[in-house]
Amino acid sequence: MAHIHEKIDFTVAIFVVQNSRVLLIHHRKLDKWLPLGGHIELDEDPEQAALREAREESGLEVELIGERPPTTEPGTRALIAPRFLDIHRITETHEHIGLIYWARPKNGTLTHAELEHHDLRWCSSADLDALKPAMSNAVKWYCGKALEEVRD
């Protein structure tokens, strides 16, 4: 996906939890352990981006977890609120505003998207410290919070 602006883009991160484990990918280009996710494209809203990225990167259809206010009416569609937001630097001149979602798998078959990542795996809280390369403190914190909050 091309950047939609030279200075900043909007992205989604999807922490999928099942059986007290969170799904992580070893990102091929960045050589980091990350949640599923990517850029929000111009023709989609954040929910659509999260569902698309989860499907593309894992083969899973997921259910986003969060509250949707009852405010949908003609001209307005309520969205599920992300659990957290952050802003993170990509290069000296480019940042991403990240919309961070919790999710559960609904159906599909876990599939390794070889062009996107080296590996993908379900990780328990205890597994997080053993990942190589080590994940960032921020990603580890979000993993822990998702595992704490999302119950089967």
Image: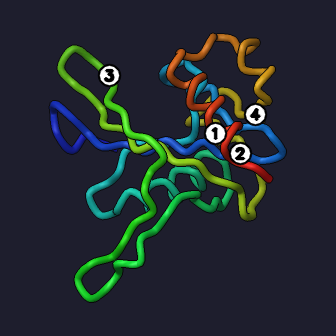
Q: Residues within 10 Å of mark 4 (few under 14, many from 20)?
A: some
Tell me the number on the disc at residue 90: 3
Of label 4 and label 1, which has the lower sequence position? Answer: 4
Query: In this rendering, which labeled residue sits more in front, label 4 or label 1?
Result: 1
2 up-or-down from 133: above or below: below
Circle 4: residue type: Arg
Residue contact at pointers 3 and 2, CB within 8 angstroms: no
Circle 1: residue type: Ala
Circle 2: residue type: Val
Circle 3: residue type: Ile
Residue contact at pointers 1 and 2, CB within 8 angstroms: yes
Q: Residues within 10 Å of mark 2 (few under 14, many from 20)?
A: many
Q: Residues within 10 Å of mark 1 (few under 14, many from 20)?
A: many
Residue extending furthest toward the bottom: 74
Query: In this rendering, which labeled residue sits more in front, label 2 or label 4?
Result: 2
Q: CA gap, disc 4 to disc 1?
A: 16 Å
Of label 2 and label 4, which has the lower sequence position? Answer: 2
Residue contact at pointers 4 and 1, CB within 8 angstroms: no
In the rendered structure, the answer to whether residue 113 lies left or right of residue 32 reads right
Residue drawn at x 46%, y 68% is 68
Q: CA gap, disc 2 to disc 4?
A: 11 Å
